[in-house]
Amino acid sequence: MTYVGMDLHKNFLQIATMDDKGNLLQNTRIDNDLEAVNKFFQNMPDDHIKVVMESSSVWYNIYCYLRYERNLDVILSNPLKTKAIASAKIKTDKIDAKVLADLLRGGYIAECYVPDKKIMQLRDLVKHREFLVRLRTKMKNRIHAILLMNGIRITGAKQPFSKIYVQHLKDLQNYRIDGYIRLIDSLNCEINCVSTMIHRFAQEDRMASLLTSIPGIGYYSALLISSTIGDINRFPDSHHLCAYAGLVPTTYSSGGTTYHGRITRTGSRYLRWVLAECVHSHIRYQKDSNITRFYHRIAKRRGNAKATVAATSKLLRIVYWVLKEQREYRHITVKE
């Protein structure tokens, strides 16, 4: 078996190869190009190669090529948990590649979950919409800042950026506000187009369709949750899913004393954000559900912020059982 450690960079790749006994065979630098990668691996026996690379901004293209085109055994390493590299006092590209290969040989790589291409495309789609919405919000905030700076109040409109509100903004004949309005109109068109695609994909996706049966979870939220989680069977129970989402408390134990602190906040921030939004929507429209009563009970003792986190964790446990048993929410009995 040949173990290959790849340290990925924007313009080049540092690749170290190692045999079963830990002997370094080569440690070379090649261009970050699929032709160069193909040339490097073409003289190696494909059935005796195991590859590890760290998760970075350039991993996906190379991973897909090695995994699907060359059918190699490829592992994506979690850089936050690769302590030997992160804490090294002497850190170079050659050392990083060598250490990755050595850790792979010993079976000490903290592996990242890599979903299939379909789920990756769905992730990109929902994240693209989230980016467009945040960009539109920035434009609206800039308009509010201009109005505030000039002491202008818009009256006669019930909601900001309604048709009447926008018309009042146009009547101000401010070139900056007019420019932002044009940008917002353009973003609205893009968001509507992406939302239509999300609605169609969510209806076609079995997992997303099941999640929409939970009050408070719409098509966009369902597709974001299902694409982020991926294969639900990789989690043995709902607690492991909450830990994956960073919704479990940190624990410090020493000398017989155990302290539980804030949530870990590991994993996808998109998943935690959308679950919190779904919780507030659920509480708003489901006044007598278990989650709503749980939220108000915690809020009285600990405050709204902590109640939101606790209710979010409870909602994620429901999500787990809906996906695990592949049944709609009204037929699910939460076991944990």
Image (tube, rainbow, N blue to C red):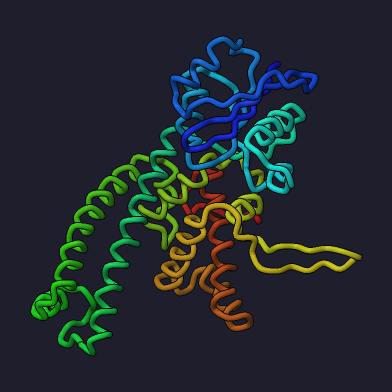
Depth check, front residue: 66 or 39: 39
Where residue 246 sits, quadrant-wise, is bottom right
Give the total number of marks visible in the rendering.
0
Q: Is residue 318 shown left or right of residue 210? A: right
Where residue 167 sits, quadrant-wise, is bottom left
Q: Residue at x 78, y 69 (%)?
A: 259
Residue that protrudes farthest toward the right in the picture: 255
Where residue 190 appears, as percent x and y from the top left, is 23, 52
Residue 63 position (above or below residue 310): above
Where residue 263 appears, as percent x and y from the top left, is 64, 64
Residue 45 position (above or below residue 316): above
Residue 305 position (above or below residue 327): below
Q: Residue at x 27, y 85 (%)?
A: 148
Depth check, front residue: 125 or 217: 125
Where residue 194 appears, as percent x and y from the top left, is 27, 49
Depth check, front residue: 14 or 77: 14
Depth check, front residue: 281 or 135: 135
The quadrant in which the C terminus is found is: bottom right
Q: Residue at x 51, y 72 (%)?
A: 292
Where residue 278 appears, as percent x and y from the top left, is 44, 63
Q: Residue at x 61, y 51 (%)?
A: 244
The quadrant in which the N terminus is found is: top right
Residue 148 position (above or below residue 315): below
